[in-house]
Image (cartoon, grey):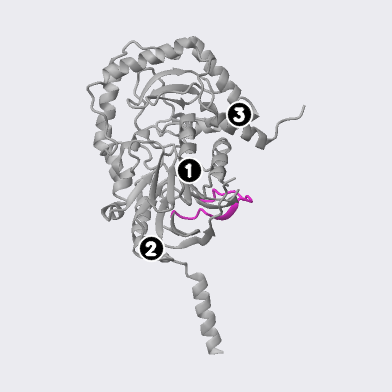
Amino acid sequence: MALPSIPGVFLALALVALSPAKEDPGVPKEFRVRMAEYLKARQQAIKDIPAVPAKSTPEQIHAGQVAMFQAVHAMRPNAQQGSVFTADMQEFVVKIVQSEMKGKDGQAARGTTKQGNPAMESPQGKLSVKVNAAYPEDAPLSSVPPTLLLRLPQLPKELDYRFVGRHLILRDTGANMIVDYIPNVVP
Amino acid sequence: MTHRIILFFYLSLALAWPAEVHGPIKAKSFRFAVIGDSGTGGNGAREVGAQLAKARETFPFDVVVMLGDNLYGGQKPKDFQTKFEQPYKTLLDAGVKFYASLGNHDDPSQDSYKLFNMNGRKYYTFQPADRVRFFALDSNYMDKAQLSWLEGELKKTNSDWKICFFHHPLYSSGERHGPSLEMRALLEPLFVKYGVSLVLSGHEHFYERIKPQRGIYYFIVGSSAKLRKDGIARTDLTVKGFSSDLAFTLMELVDDQLSFQTITRTGQAVDSGVLVRTPTRE
């Protein structure tokens, strides 16, 4: 069987990337429900916090982030690992990550997760990952392989995927808080 | 004989004496400066800031683009001061506008910092002069939304000079990081299709000018505060590599020509030239 050429693979990747966004039918429904619930509760929790202006001082940015963290953190004191990344969602994500990152073909993607990854680059060294905890202020944020982002369910602007060590975390971008994580997802 | 000796002496001196910043080719051209991986707040960063301000006396510019890693480590209010506002105080006081892109060491909340002119957006576009449009991308998180946005913006602009800048280089001879091949697979087809002429990146802590790829000029300017000496591997990609000292790059656009000069923190020009824009729309 003839293997596809590298330019062919790149072309296919580019075509996938540029095709209109479609909701992946494989994404577990329960994950979407939990994410919607999180966003609704979040909106309620931060309703009295003034939005950080688009042209802020560093003090305004810092104050906004602290206030938002306190509000979002307080709204879910009992949150645990798996509260948003449901079991079937974890399985769904692990399959995608493994297929993107396994073996020699996944070398570039694995390398990308190490860039900015606080477990590799932070002066604090290894960081513990805890649900509902603040993402450490001084720690860098990992890059996320674009090929992976094209396959994972697209997130609203309030959330993003990042890597800490081999764990995939779901981060609240405004509160800079770890919403949930999937442990040891990177092969 | 004496004349020959004197001539030889001056010639030797001219060759040994490092080139310095040269002024603009044309008085009313658009000019800008490029810095990358600049956010240490250390002595080197301050020296680069001072040299950039000095260069502006000879080569006036009102725009600086930042290629990411704008603030290393802490991102508290004092860090904005020590790692950005103080090293570039002279330029900021003179009204020079900085336009930042995010690196892997940057907290994305920097997008709301007024002096980075990102206006709350992690990727954005701006037009500082007629016929010139910049596109700042977030190469840490290149998702579908960003790719769609980029294609939409590239499609609708009619600027001659389309310049993209972002942190991770698509082409690099760096021994530590190397090129971002996945990103290249996604971005290069768009750059080629919509006639992007110039791409600026950092991440690698050195300066590298890459051989034009599919009609596009690529520069890495990632040594404005951090340096990886001998970090450039021997590859066919390099037209000019420099990793012996901290540096920044000055650029001028005159019609279809791009004039550039890369300057060290001590004011030596280590690379310069004129490149011609080649429309690459396919």
- What is the CA distance from the residue labelled 3 to the residue labelled 1? 21 Å
Give the label on residue B188, or none: none
Residue A170, above or below B166: above
What amino acid is found at the position of numbered circle 1 in the picture? Answer: His
N-term-proximal mark, 1 vs 2: 2
- Of B196 and B3, the residue lying toward us: B196
Q: Residues within 10 Å of mark 1 (few under 14, many from 20)?
A: many
Q: Quadrant of the C terminus of chain B?
A: top right
- Residue at 29 percent across and 42 percent down: it is B114
Relative to A115, is B80 on the left or the right? left
Q: Which residue in the protein does label 2 denote?
A: B28
Residue B65, above or below A10: below
Q: Which residue in the protein does label 1 denote?
A: B203
- What is the CA distance from the residue labelled 1 to the residue labelled 2? 32 Å
Q: Which residue in the protein does label 3 denote?
A: A106
Expressed as whole percent of the image width and height from the top left, the position of residue B108 reads 37, 34
Expressed as whole percent of the image width and height from the top left, the position of residue B208 reads 53, 52
What amino acid is found at the position of numbered circle 2 in the picture? Answer: Lys
- Residue at 48 percent across and 52 percent down: it is B160
Q: Write down the region rendered in magenta.
A: B229-247
Relative to B6, is A125 on the left or the right? left
Badges 3 and 1, same chain:
no
Relative to A181, is B173 on the left or the right? right
Expressed as whole percent of the image width and height from the top left, the position of residue B27 reads 38, 65
Q: Quadrant of the N terminus of chain B?
A: bottom right
| Chain under numbered label 2 | B
Q: Based on the displayed image, in which of its 4 quarters is residue B263 positioned?
A: bottom left
Q: Tell me, yes or no, whether the two marked residues, 1 and 2, touch with CB atoms within 8 Å.
A: no
